[in-house]
Image (cartoon, grey):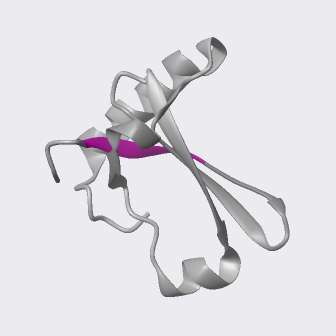
């Protein structure tokens, strides 16, 4: 992890489209997050991990109505998994 990176934990995974999966990783306090959309095909080749390190400038503020949920989920993932665990 570089000095400009922030560890974020998987807090949400949704599949609204038959070809795309949306992954949301958030900071442990739930204040900031990053969203990634990946194809199912890519996910079969590249595993989803419990955490990723994200450049701080890529993080977005989390909507107020999601902050508590993201914080709770991020903390739970951090307690139960190592960052490189496949989930």
Vertical placement of residue 12 versus 48, above or below = above
Vertical placement of residue 65 versus 72, above or below = above
Confirm whether the magenta stretch covers residue 3.
Answer: no
Question: Picture coordinates of residue 31 (x, y %)?
Answer: 44, 21
In the image: residue 81, left or right of residue 49: left
The quarter of the rendered structure image containing the C terminus is bottom left
Residue 17 is drawn in which quadrant?
bottom right
Q: Residue placed at 17% from the left, 53% from the top?
A: 1
Question: Picture coordinates of residue 15 (x, y %)?
Answer: 76, 59
Residue 19 is drawn in which quadrant?
bottom right
Q: Residue placed at 35% from the left, 49% from the top?
A: 54
Question: Picture coordinates of residue 30 (x, y %)?
Answer: 43, 24
Q: Which residues are magenta?
A: 5-12
Vertical placement of residue 40 versus 56, above or below = below
Pick the residue in front: 80 or 59: 59
Q: Which residue is situated farthest in the right direction here?
A: 17
In the image: residue 71, left or right of residue 23: left
Q: How many marks?
A: 0
Pick the residue in front: 36 or 51: 36
């Amino acid at each position: 992890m570089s000095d400009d990176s922030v560890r974020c934990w998987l807090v949400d995974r949704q599949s609204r489209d038959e070809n795309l999966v949306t992954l949301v990783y958030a900071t442990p306090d739930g204040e900031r997050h990053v969203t990634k959309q990946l194809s199912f095909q890519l996910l079969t080749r590249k595993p989803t991990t419990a955490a990723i390190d994200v450049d701080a400038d890529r993080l977005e503020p989390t909507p107020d109505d999601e902050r508590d949920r993201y914080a709770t989920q991020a903390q739970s993932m951090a307690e139960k998994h190592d960052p490189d665990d496949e989930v």
